[in-house]
Amino acid sequence: MTRNALMIPTALRGRTAGRFATLLALACALPVAWVDSREIPASAMLPAYRQECAGCHMAYPPGMLPASSWSRMMQGLDQHYGTDASLDAAMVRQISTWLAAHAGTYKRVREAPPQDRITQSAWFERKHRDVEPGVWKRAAVGSRANCMACHTRADQGDFDDDRVRIPK
Ligand code: HEC
Ligand code: HEC
C-alpha cells in the first residue's frame, strides 16, 4: 500500500489525489488477498517452520491452505503423504499455532482441498490448466508439489507468472 501511495505522481497530488487514492485502494483490494498467502518469503517465516517443514520440500506459504487443513496435517505427521515427518509435541504446538494464525482465510482458500493438498485446490488447477500433463512427470519436476522446479523464486514468496520457467 505504502509503495503504491508513493507512486502517485506529484502532479496528481492535491485536487485529484483523493479520487486517485480511492481508485488505487480499490485496485489493491484484490491482490491483498494473495499478499498474505503467497508473498511470504521464507526469511519471514517462523524459524521452526522453516527448519522443520522445508527439509523435504520448500516451506509452503501458509496462506495457501485453510487452518483446518494445517491442523489436520499437524496432527498426522507420522503419516505425512507416505512419509514420517513426526516432531515432538512442543514443536508441533509451536508450528501449529503459527500456521493457524497465517492460514488462508479468503474465498479461494477457505475450503479444505482433497488430501489437504495445495496442489488439489481448485485455484491451483485453474492456474495450471495450461500445463501439459506430461510436464509434471518430467524428471526435473517430478511432482506438482515441487513448486521450485518452475517457480524459480518460490522460496521468496514469488509465484509471479513472469518468473515461471518450465524445465525441459
Ligand atoms: C520427511 C520428509 C518431509 C517432512 C519433514 C515434511 N514433509 Fe511435507 N511432504 C512430504 C512429502 C513426501 C510430500 C508429498 C509430496 C508430493 O506429493 O510430491 C509432502 C507434502 C506436503 C504438503 C502437500 C503438498 C501438495 O501437494 O500440495 C504440504 C502442505 C506439506 N507437505 C507440509 C508440510 C509441513 C507443514 C511440514 C512440517 C511440519 C512438512 N510438510 C514436513 C515430506 C515431508
Ligand atoms: C511444471 C511447472 C510448475 C510447477 C511444478 C508449479 N507451477 Fe505454478 N505455475 C506454472 C505455470 C506454467 C503457471 C501459469 C503461468 C502463466 O499463467 O503464464 C503457474 C501459475 C501459478 C500461480 C499463479 C501465478 C499468477 O501470477 O497468477 C500460482 C500462485 C502458482 N502457480 C503456485 C504454484 C505452487 C504453490 C506450486 C507448488 C505447490 C506450483 N505453482 C507448482 C507452473 C508450475
Image (cartoon, rainbow, N blue to C red):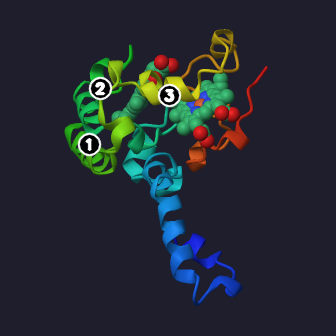
- Residue drawn where x is 67% and y is 9% of the image: 134
* Quadrant (top left/top right/bottom left/bottom right) for the C terminus: top right
Asked if residue 138 can be seen in this view, the reply is yes
Q: Can you give x and y, in whole percent of width and height, for residue 13 in the image?
A: 61, 86
User: Quick one: label 3 or label 2, which is nearer the N terminus?
Assistant: 2
Q: Can you give x and y, in whole percent of width and height, for residue 137 in the image?
A: 64, 11
Q: Is residue 110 left or right of residue 44?
A: left
Asked if residue 65 can be seen in this view, the reply is no
Q: Is residue 97 above or below residue 151?
A: below
Q: Is mark 2 within 8 Å of ligand 1?
A: yes
Q: Residues within 10 Å of mark 2 (few under 14, many from 20)?
A: some
- Residue drawn where x is 64% and y is 77% of the image: 8
Q: Is mark 3 within 8 Å of ligand 2?
A: yes
Quadrant of picture, ligand 1: top left
From the viewer's side, name the closer residue of 65 and 75: 65
- Residue drawn where x is 31% and y is 45% of the image: 105
Which residue type does callout 3 highlight?
Answer: Phe
Q: Residue furthest right?
A: 168
Residue at the spot of label 2: 77
Helix, strand or loop at mark 3: helix
Which residue type does callout 1 highlight?
Answer: Ser
Q: Is residue 131 left or right of residue 32?
A: right
Residue at the spot of label 3: 124
Mark pair 1, 2: CA separation? 12 Å
